[in-house]
Amino acid sequence: MTISAVIITCNEERNIGRCLDSLQDLVDEVVVVDSGSHDGTESICLAQGVRFVRHEWEGYSEQKNFANGLASQEWILSLDADEALSPALRTSLMQLRNHPPEGHVAFRFHRLTNYCGHFVRYCGWYPDSKIRLWRSGSARWEGRVHEILAFEAEPHVVTLDGDLLHYSYYSISEHAERQNRYSLLAAEKAYEGGRRCGLSAVVLKPVWTFLRDYLLRLGFLDGATGLIICRFNAHYTFMKYARLRELCRTQNG
């Protein structure tokens, strides 16, 4: 079983070393496609002997599809720069290499997010399962905001033991900035898809989001971190629907 690890980057010097370290002695090649880093990302990658390619940003899905097209091995292991394999997941992948699967199969990982130094197990953030290992050429990324993997034919999906560690947010201000950007993209996508909303959605949906994530999804068990995340989740919902309502009003005159 031969594996190409594929990663896209832009100014990821604080993350990429950890990601690459977790791939040591596991994959046959690492392909990094960079969209214009001006920090130490390139030097860190080259020091680890990866194939480093610069490519102008095309959006998440197309950038990842371009990177996948550079992979030369039979299997693609797709990671984000701010992710890393846990020791348990590395062990699962090593065992898989030694006993290659047959048939049309893909492999899913549970993703465990680190928020400002705290691993979050509730709030609806875990297990956040993602397909990240599949046969090259059998799937493409699609979508503008949260890209999804689309297969030519649906595979049998197997979940591997161990977690994919996701070092997503280092500060609350970083979370706020990213949330502001994503809520606008989500509103635009919803509008383009024909969705509309009134004032009631702007008011009620954020309330439901907080109650669902903090109580039903046990966000309170993550302590102060859980409270902060659930509050942010509610605010994201508010911004998405407020911006969608704004788009509806401005586009309709």
Image (spheres, rainbow, N blue to C red):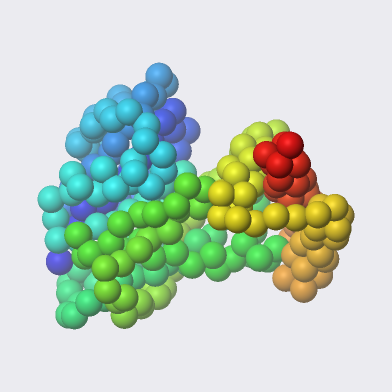
Nearer to me, 57 or 38: 57
Residue that extends furthest to the top in the rendered view of this protein: 38
Q: Give the residue drawn at x 77%, y 68%.
A: 212
Quadrant housing residue 158? bottom left
Q: Can residue 119 be seen in this view?
A: no
Q: Which quadrant of the rendered structure holds the N terminus? A: bottom left
Residue that extends furthest to the front in the rendered view of this protein: 253
Residue 60 position in % (x across, y down): 41, 43
Tell me: 89 left or right of 189: left
Total marks in image: 0
Q: Give the residue drawn at x 37%, y 36%.
A: 58
Quadrant housing residue 170? top right
Q: Give the residue drawn at x 26%, y 43%.
A: 66
Q: Which quadrant of the rendered structure holds the C terminus? A: top right
Q: Can residue 14 be seen in this view?
A: yes
Residue 12 position in % (x across, y down): 43, 33
Residue 207 position in % (x across, y down): 85, 60
Q: Give the residue drawn at x 37%, y 32%.
A: 57
Tell me: 101 left or right of 223: left
Tell me: 71 left or right of 201: left
Nearer to me, 208 or 189: 189
Q: Is residue 20 above or below residue 35?
A: below
Residue 222 position in % (x across, y down): 74, 61
